[in-house]
Amino acid sequence: MDSNVMDGELKTVSLLNLKMDAQGAGTFAALFAPFNVVDKSLDVTMPGAFGRQRVVISAYGHGSTVDGRLPVGKGIIYDSEELGGGVVEGKFFLNTSVGLDTYNTVKELGELQQWSYYLPKVESEQGTRDGKKVRILKKIEVGEVSPVLRGVGNGTRTLAIKGDVFQERDGDFDTAIRRIGEIVEALKGRAEYRKSVSRRPSATDLKRARALDLQLGDLVRELHTIVNENDMIDEAWLTLQSFEMGRD
């Protein structure tokens, strides 16, 4: 608990397995409150405690609640039966300095990063778990979610965080292209070997090749659109430049 936050409570779980997701730059997702787990403050969150709520993503260390600092993002929390807990899906404000700084910090800290949430209103009852007296949290109103250094929660599952691919290290682009080439060469090599011994490619390799062909085909068509549109613009620009030079 944080004594600096009045009339409410804070809980935190570790963020693990940071990875890129597919929802857009600055987005993240985390299982921030596992159900039926006794935390360090002897509280147990029950399934269905959160419902669906829109939340503010606070400045680091609950700075927006404690010190009135600008929020760094926004999100939605909901109960996930599949993941077994409360899930937050949010987006950092990458167009603000505080949002971008917080995003970069969370991303770089990886599994060391923890998240906390602020509870201004709780419906609870007393109970017993594993021989310990606990408070069972049945309904929780979440005021904000915040990245912090330390918290009292236990048992996070997954997290995804995504950035702008053009803000990643320059080598990532070359690595991705090289890796695709290596996969294609490996599939080609195995197919040629099996052909030399009068055998068809394996069912697994064929499945992989078809999936890659389909995916790359769609990507290539999108790339052609970008290149062709740019070529048309360049051609129009050159034509205009030639016209202007002819008038001089």
Image (cartoon, grey):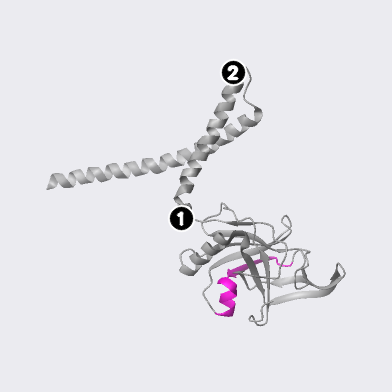
Residue toward you, 4 or 140? 4
Residue 213 seen by the camera: no
Rendering coords of residue 118 (x, y %): 65, 74
Q: Amino acid at mark 1?
A: Gln
Q: Residue at x 19, y 43 (%)?
A: 242
**Residue 51 among those drawn in magenta:** yes
Residue toward you, 127 or 218? 127
Badge 1: residue crowd in 10 Å (few <14, some 14–19, many ≥20): few
Q: Does the residue at mark 2 contact the one at mark 1 (Cβ under 8 Å)?
A: no
What number is the disc on residue 196? Answer: 2
Rendering coords of residue 137 (x, y %): 77, 71
Left or right position of 166 against 159: left
Residue 73 seen by the camera: yes
In the picture, the quarter occupied by the N terminus is bottom right
Q: Amino acid at mark 2?
A: Ser
Q: Is residue 11 above or below residue 85?
A: below
Badge 2: residue crowd in 10 Å (few <14, some 14–19, many ≥20): few
Magenta range is 49-67
Q: Residue at x 49, y 44 (%)?
A: 175
**Residue 35 among those drawn in magenta:** no
Residue under circle 1?
167
Q: Residue at x 21, y 46 (%)?
A: 241
- Dot 1: element: helix
Q: Is residue 217 above or below residue 36?
A: above
Left or right position of 241 against 228: left
Rendering coords of residue 20 (x, y %): 57, 53
Q: CA distance from mark 2 to mark 1?
A: 45 Å
